[in-house]
Structures are given as structure tokens and as C-alpha cells.
Image (cartoon, helix red, strand yellow):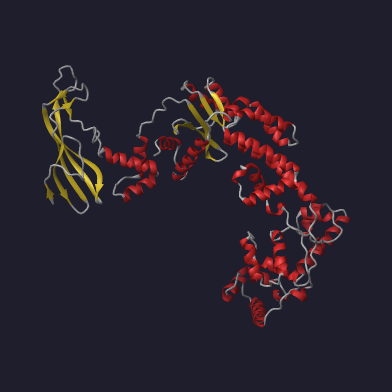
Amino acid sequence: MVVMMERTPFLPLPEGMFIEQIETSKTDIVVSVISTHPTSCCPLCTEPSSSVHSYYQRSVRDLPCGGRNIRLLLTVRKFFCRNPDCKRKIFTERLSTFVEPWAKVTNRLCEAIQAIGLSTSGSLGARLAARLGISSSWMTVLRRIMDLPTPAAGSVVALGIDDFSFRRGRKFGTILVNLDKHQVIDLLDERSSKTAADWMRGHPEIDYVSRDRGKDYTQGATEGAPQAIQISDRFHLMKNLVEAIEPEVSRCYKQLRQAQRPLPTPSLPKADEWRQALDADAERKRLARLADKQERFEQVKGLLSSGLSPKEIAQRLAMPVRTVYRWQEREGCPAYQPQHKAQTDKQERFEQAKALRLRGLSQKDIAGRLAIGVRTVQRWQGRETGPASQPRRKRRSIFDPYAPYVLSRWQQGCRDVSLLWQEIQEQGFAGSLQTVYRFVKVLRQESASLPVPSVLDRVAVQKAIWLLARPSEKLKAQERTDLQELCQASQELAALHTLVQSFGQMVRKREGHRLQDWMRQVETSSFRDVKRFAQGLERDQEEVLAGLTLVYSNGQVEGQINKLKLIKRQGYGRAGFPLLRQRMLHAL
């Protein structure tokens, strides 16, 4: 089908170019385009010329339309250069705003492929382009990305610098961010003070350098930008303080738990008084399974006596061959073995180990002779009785904080265990229904009195650290109650909470003038790890004061690193540093 038209809004063209005809098919649209500019400039001397030498045709791909590929047949002219001093006598008409010289695709199609590649990756970009009707390979997508010019860093007044990992814990790179423009200006392929200093020397206009508290970037900023004010990142300051209070909170918890009264040992009822008897149907099924196992055991023994191999028997009876090997060594059916055989064997080995030790054998020889571990022999040497006879000690469980509630409901007359389980589930209980059943079995025998659960049972060490460090005004009502109970239970935790909140207020409100007073308070306290943290602040006092006073921080740098991780993972870890740098600098 041939259509004659001068222009169409569905295929915009630059000024001086007109559509001569359009040929359509089921998959393609071929558009013939002619150029009607009266003159063209020589690419060598830029002298305009109107003397046409000849015509020729270029075939160029354009953006698809309506699911069809568009191919442009451009009729382009050659001109005589009338400048006698120019070395080029004949030149080709340039259409740089629409298509580059010698290019096979239009500029807008190239820009679309670049945008797809920057937003995705090579292989994924090729698949997405195919869904959009653009035919392109993954290598072409990557090539278009790498053809983009590296953007100039420009003038950088406030620089944010941090590291990112190519492989966590093994290889690191460096990201540089313009804090005023919130823009990534460069990536370096290593984390070292030398590369950071070399980059900063090329930008003497830098006045501020925001960094973490590591030695690499501290030294790099000192050597590469001595004129700049170094700023310790506020996030890392708070993070270092939280790391410093963790051993202090653990120590306080340990002291509080040692001061707690031990849980009372429950008086469990006798087994025949509370264990539910099996119903008739379950007992019948159990006996049927035992009879079936006995029958199969006898079949295996009969087939073994007839000369069949264990593998043939396993195939004939549709059972595992390892089971046949085990039954081959047994005299009776394993279903009728005594229940406490394992305990009996363990006690016999314990007595044999004692006897062999009295005869002067080494622990290694005893372990080899009895087929047990050397560490097991070492543990048994310090015992007077067998390991199976050691009494169990009562341990705290996840049910303990909810036991008083279940006890009160039981005393009110509630005997529906499922209902009790649902009620404590709404309060945060994560255990199973069987856990509640085991507790209720004790209640059915006699009344139980349990101590009121303390805050240590509800709040773990990590949550306590979070309660101490988070701003008090952002805590919920229950969290404030837990924090108050913790501070009442331990004066050290109360003092630690005061110090942490004071430092957090300095960080959030940038009140650097209070730092000296805070460090004096730490010096008079008994917290060794917090004192060590304060000594580190004193060594970097100027940088810390700048971080607690100036508006700049590394928060946006951390956000850019998060974006970089996403781009890196889109390449499935197979993209090299040049491609990663190019995609990050041109990220949309």
C-alpha cells in the first residue's frame, strides 16, 4: 500500500524534511523522506553551499509505531564546497539533529535504547526493548550506554564520600556525591586514601568533606583537600554509640538476671493421672502397623534365607535397601525392641569408659575402642554417674510471661484450652497449642502460683538497646512502660539512658556546643565502653564538632549507595566497573 503525504503528526521530522510516500505491510512501515534544505554547510570549513553534486539514499531504522517496525529511506544530497581554500571539494549533507553520519538508526531510537539500558541492564534491556517493538541485542544496549559521554563533575563545594562493596568483605569501591546538588559525580574502583586524595586534588574548590570515621577517607581528605573542613557523619556517630552501649546493656541484664529469684520447680502429676489414654481407633491402627511390620520382617528373613540379595528383596517388597541391611543383622522385629535400649547402651558405654580409664588407657584409645567421640570421653571423666541420670533444670520458656494470665483465667473457670491459646496469641504469644496443654495439665492437678513476669522476660537485650537509643517522644505507650521498668530495675540503665538521649539530642538538633559537657558526664560515669567511645570523639574533636554543627551529612550518600546496589544487582554481578560507573553517573 502506497500513501502520498507531505507530513504526519505520527512521524515528526525536523524542519526541511518531508515525507514523499509511505509503504505499509503487516510488520513494517517504509517511509521515503526527502530533504529540501536549500543549502548545507561543509563539515570541514563550515562554509554554506547550494551547489548540488548528486543524490543518494540512506536506510535508517526509527522508533516503532503501532507495533510495526519503521524504516526510513532518506534521500540525501551531496554538495560542492565552493571554498577554494578547503581541502574537501565534495561533502554530504548533514542531518545531525535527526541522524548522525554513517548511523543506521535515528537519534531518538538511539536515545530510547540508552534509556532502556540505563533503567534495566543489557539482557533485561534487550528483552524489554523487544516487548516495545525495538529490535536490539544485549550487546547493542551496552554499547549505547558506554557511548554516552562522562558528565563533568563541575564545581564541588560540599563533597560526600563513602565506600560500597563489589564483594562484601573482600573488595570495595568509593562513591563521591555532590551534597549540594544531591548528585553522584564519580565512582572509584577501590577504597584507599591515595585514590581519594588524587581525586580531591583535582578539585581545589572543595570546602567541606563529609565522611565516616574510617582512617582511609580521613587520611585521603587530609592529603587531597587540606583546605576543606572535614565532617564526621552523624549517622555513624550514633551508630558507634549504639555499638558502645551494647556490652553495657548486656552486663546490666546479666546482673539483673542473677538477682532474680529462680523459678519454682513445678510439681508434675503422675503420668497415669493426666495423660489421655489412646482411643480405640488409634490403638487399633497402632496394632495393625506393628503387625504389618512384623509380617514384612519375617518376609525379609525368609527371602534372605532363600539366597536373594538385599537389593532384590528391597525391589520385590518396595522398601528401602538400607532397611533390609539393618534387619539382616537383627534377630527380632525392631518394633518390639525395649524402649529404653538407647539409655541402657549409653550407661554401659559410660561404665566401660570408666573401667578402661582405670586400666590406664588414654582418652583417644578409649574413644576409638568404644566408637565414641574424644570430647564425650572427656566429659564422662568428670562424672560420677551416667549422663542419662542427670537431673534437668528448669529453663525459662516463651510461655512464662503469659502463664499468670492463663492461671487467672483458669481460676475464673475457663477450661477451654483452645480459647486460652487464642487469647494469649493476641497478646503476642508465638508458641503452639501443645505448650498451653502442657501447662494446663499441671493446673488440673493442683493450684499453681507463678511469679509475676519481669520486664526482662518481655524485653530482649537488642530491644532494650533500641528503647534506650530511640527518641523518647517516638516510643509507644507500652514501650515507654518497658523503658521505665528497665530504668527502675537498674540505676545503671537509667544513667545510660540519660547519656544516650543527651547525645542523640545533640546529633538531631546539631548542638555541638554541648559536646564538652557530655564528655565530662561520661568521664564521671562507670561505663568503660562509652568512655572509650568518648575518647575516640576527643581524638577527632574538630570533625565531630563540624558534624554536630553543620548541615552537611552522609545521609544522602547512603541513599545513593542503596541505589548503586540495585543497579549492581540488575547486572547479576557480572558487569564490570566501567559499566557500573557509567550507569550510576547517567542514572535516571
Looking at the image, residue 411 sits to the left or right of residue 96; the answer is right
Question: Which residue sits at x=14%, y=31%?
Answer: 37
Question: Which residue sits at x=42%, y=28%?
Answer: 153
Q: Return the residue found at the far right.
A: 358
Picture quadrant where residue 309 is located: bottom right
Q: x%, y% of residue 518?
A: 68, 31
Up the image or down, 155 lies above or below 291; here it is above
* Foreground residue among 564 and 127: 564
Up the image or down, 406 lies above or below 564; here it is below
Where's the C terminus, which quadrant? top left
Q: x%, y% of residue 447?
A: 78, 69
* Foreground residue among 481 and 241: 481
Looking at the image, residue 333 sits to the left or right of residue 263; the answer is left
Question: Which residue sits at x=62%, y=37%?
Answer: 504
Looking at the image, residue 237 sits to the left or right of residue 52; the answer is right
Picture quadrant where residue 470 is located: top right
Q: x%, y% of residue 340?
A: 77, 70
Q: Return the residue found at the far top.
A: 85
Q: x%, y% of residue 99?
A: 24, 36
